[in-house]
Every structure is written in C-alpha cells, then in structure tokens.
Image (cartoon, rainbow, N blue to C red):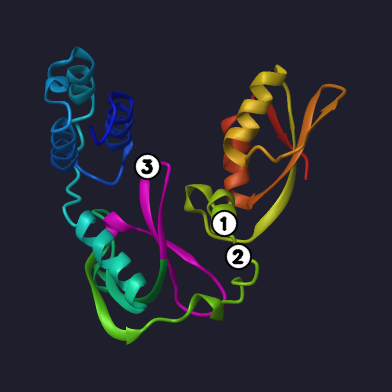
Amino acid sequence: RVFDLSQIYYLIDAVFSSKTIDSAQTNELIDRLFYFYPKLKEKLYLKNTIKHNTNRGKNYSDVFYNISIVNEAIDKKKKIRFKYFNDYSDKEQQEKEYIANPFFTYTSNGVYFAVLGFGKEKLYHYKLYMMKDLEMINENAQEFNELSISNNFNLTDYIKEHYYAFSGDVIVATIKMSGKESFVKNAVCEWFGEDVEIKLCDDGYIFSCKAVKEFIICWVLQYAKHATLLT
C-alpha cells in the first residue's frame, strides 16, 4: 500500500484541521484518501469526525488554483498580480491590485500563506484563500538574495519566529513560567523548539526565545496563568 493506516488517519486529521479549504473541498480530499482504504469510510470514528467538521460556510474554491499559480511563479521566478480581500472588505480594498515577488509558501495554525516581497527590506504574509484574480505575469521576479534579510536566512527559523504569520521585527524575550517541569518544558519546546534553554529559578522557570513581538505577547496571554513576560 502507498500509505499505512496510521498515515491515512494522520492525513485525514490534517485535512480536517485546515482553515483554508471549505466543506466541499474537505470532503473531496477525504474521499480521495478513502481510495486507499475503502472500508475506512464506514468506521464510527470517521462518521463522527465528518459530522463534526462539515459546518464550514465559506467558499474557498480558488485556494488550490492559487497554490498552483504561486508555486509555479516561484519555480519560474515570475511576479504575480492579485487582489486581496474577504467578505468584510470595503469596495476600495476589493478593487486594489497588488504586484509582488513570490518567495515561498507555508502553513501556520491551519492557514496557508504565501510569503511575498514588494521591495528589498521586508517579507509579507498573505493568506492564499483571500487572494482573488491571481495570475502570474510575464515580469521577472526579484531574486531572494537581493533582500536585506537574505544573509544567513534560515527558512525553518523564520517560520518558527513568525508563527501565526505575524510580520515585524524579531526580538529576544525573557519569560518566566510556573507549573510542573514537564508542563513548562512541553509548552516551551512545542512552540520555540528543543534548543531553548530553560533555567530553574526560585518560583518557577525562566527561558529566552526569539520571535516577532506580537506573537510573543499572544503566546504569553495564551498561558496567562503560568507565564510572565519579563523583558
């Protein structure tokens, strides 16, 4: 078999956890995964899961097309043109056009992003399902090594530091946490990696991490009863 049973379960859960595709697209992908294990569709676990996850009302019909176009533009080193809005955007926003240099795509918290550049200074994150009238244009894109941040750039570190796709300057923060050692280590390493040094202090643990300031604030609020931002 192409996949074993545990891998099929993992892929099905990954599809259901995506915030980028709608109900119809979810069910289509799941049906294709069922091809490898036809009897799996009858299992009670999947019946309950499907029932729980088919309440998405948004229409994200362009998302797979957008993924294809952005990655094709990246491969061919061409610029893209698009509009960017959602159901709540005003008319001015809906009519605004963007021309950008596409560099890479990634997922964060169940949402698919394109990372784009408009100059030589910064990278910007755009949700692929909000990109409308997307097309690749016959204009050479900027090379990534022309960006000011390209020196010693590490994609894995960049994604880790920009979780939830926050843009902005990366800072070094010092955070104090309370709770059992296993809880603290799990909470810290799950988000900031295994290489973070966690030190014991009088009333808890202290560690330092690198990330965008807005994400660090959100992370501390998430663990409000246990986390305190020191610097």
Disc 2 or 1, which lies upstream in sequence? 2
Is label 2 or label 3 in front? 2
Name the outermost residue toward the bottom.
139
Q: Residue at x 14, y 22 (%)?
A: 41
Specify the quadrant that holds the C terminus: top right
Query: Which quadrant would residue 54 be assigned to in this image?
Result: top left
How far apart are the two marked residues, 2 and 1, measured between alpha carbons? 8 Å
The residue beneath circle 1 is: 158
The residue beneath circle 2 is: 153
The residue range painted magenta reads: 104-130
Q: Secondary structure at mark 3?
A: loop
Name the outermost residue toward the top.
44
Q: Relative to 63, does residue 135 appear above or below in the rendering?
A: below
Q: Relative to 90, does residue 149 appear above or below in the rendering?
A: below
Question: Along the line of sight, which residue is nearer the eye, 6 or 176?
Answer: 6
Q: Secondary structure at mark 2?
A: loop
Q: Are marks 2 and 3 in contact (CB under 8 Å)?
A: no
Name the outermost residue toward the front.
1
Place of residue 223 in the rendered image (x, y in percent of width and height, measured from the top left): 61, 29
Residue 77 appears left or right of 215: left
Is residue 63 shown in magenta?
A: no
Disc 3 or 1, which lies upstream in sequence? 3
How far apart are the two marked residues, 2 and 3, measured between alpha carbons? 24 Å
Is label 2 or label 1 in front? 2
Q: Residue at x 57, y 56 (%)?
A: 158
Is residue 123 shown in magenta?
A: yes
Is label 3 or label 1 in front? 1
The residue beneath circle 3 is: 110
Place of residue 57 in the rendered image (x, y in percent of width and height, measured from the top left): 18, 39
